[in-house]
Image (cartoon, rainbow, N blue to C red):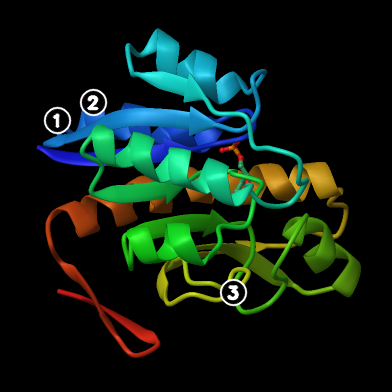
């Protein structure tokens, strides 16, 4: 069994897509633990319902990242639960050096744009405001930058003339729910390697 850990701050639709995909495809993957920095995250409830261990670890006093002591707790919890791959699924904090080094090239994220365009928050809104005709989503390895790591998979979504931020985000999320579980499957099968900035999938 390949063990993953999921970090989520919000509604957890990506977590749900991962849970469902593993079940439907009968994959030899288990979610060892779901951790949230938000006690009210619906992601925790989804984990509970699916019988997956879930914990809230308070983030500390900063808004955009975890306190150094707290990072240690997150890493400890993931290691205690034998996590081999950390999947960020709407986790709203930037991971710092200690965390990244503890799981070097073993952390992935889903971002709601075609990177390297529109890094950072509300990327679907950035895309809409900029006036692009196409946007999408990206699964990438996490490095110390913000949404800068090597790209694993991407999916394209058209921007329609009467799109609102909400309608566009919804269309992007439908694709997220397809490519994120797929990327996890490919990694679990040992088919993904990193060569400089490029990711090779066999
Ligand atoms: C997704 O849009 C993802 O791209 C971004 O955060 C959002 C999380 O959504 N990183 P959910 O909590 O999985 O529904």
The x, y position of residue 1, in whole percent, is 9, 37
Give the spatial CA distance, label 1 vs label 3.
35 Å
**Nearer the camera: disc 1 or disc 3:** 3
Q: State yes or no: discs 1 and 3 in contact (Cβ < 8 Å).
A: no
The mark total stands at 3
Give the spatial CA distance, label 3 vs label 2.
33 Å
The x, y position of residue 163, in whole percent, is 83, 52
Say whether residue 145 is left or right of residue 191.
right
Q: Secondary structure at mark 3?
A: loop
On screen, 59 above or below 117? above
Could you tell me which residue is drawn at 46 percent across and 61 percent down? 98
Give the spatial CA distance, label 2 vs label 1.
5 Å
Foreground of the two, 68 or 53: 68
Could you tell me which residue is drawn at 86 percent across and 73 percent down? 131
**Looking at the rendered structure, which numbered label has been put on residue 26?**
1
User: Which residue position holds label 3?
Assistant: 145
User: Which residue position holds label 2?
Assistant: 23
Query: Quarter for ligand 1?
Result: top right
Could you tell me which residue is drawn at 60 percent across and 63 percent down? 136
Marks 3 and 2, the one that precedes in the sequence: 2
**Nearer the camera: disc 3 or disc 2:** 3
Marks 1 and 3, the one that precedes in the sequence: 1
**Residue 195 falls in image quadrant:** bottom left
**Residue 147 falls in image quadrant:** bottom right
Q: Secondary structure at mark 2?
A: helix
Q: Secondary structure at mark 1?
A: loop
Task: Report whether residue 174 is seen.
Answer: no
Q: Quadrant of the C terminus?
A: bottom left
């Amino acid at each position: 069994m390949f063990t993953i850990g999921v970090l989520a701050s919000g509604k957890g639709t990506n977590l749900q897509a991962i849970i469902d995909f593993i079940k439907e495809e009968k994959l030899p993957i288990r979610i060892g633990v779901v951790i949230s920095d938000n006690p009210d995250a619906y992601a925790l409830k989804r984990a509970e319902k699916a019988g997956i261990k879930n914990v809230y670890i308070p983030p500390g006093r900063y808004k955009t990242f975890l306190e150094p002591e707290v990072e240690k707790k997150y890493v400890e919890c993931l290691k205690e639960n034998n996590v081999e791959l950390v999947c960020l699924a709407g986790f709203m904090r930037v991971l710092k050096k200690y965390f990244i080094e503890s799981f070097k090239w073993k952390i992935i994220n889903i971002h709601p744009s075609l990177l390297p365009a529109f890094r950072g928050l509300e990327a679907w809104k950035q895309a809409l405001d900029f006036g692009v005709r196409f946007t999408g989503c990206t699964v990438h390895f996490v490095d110390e930058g913000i949404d800068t790591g090597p790209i694993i998979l991407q999916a394209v979504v058209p921007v329609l003339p009467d799109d609102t931020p909400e309608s566009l985000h919804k269309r992007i999320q439908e694709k997220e729910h397809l490519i994120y579980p797929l990327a996890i499957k490919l990694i679990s099968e040992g088919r993904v390697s990193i060569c400089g900035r490029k990711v090779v999938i066999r």
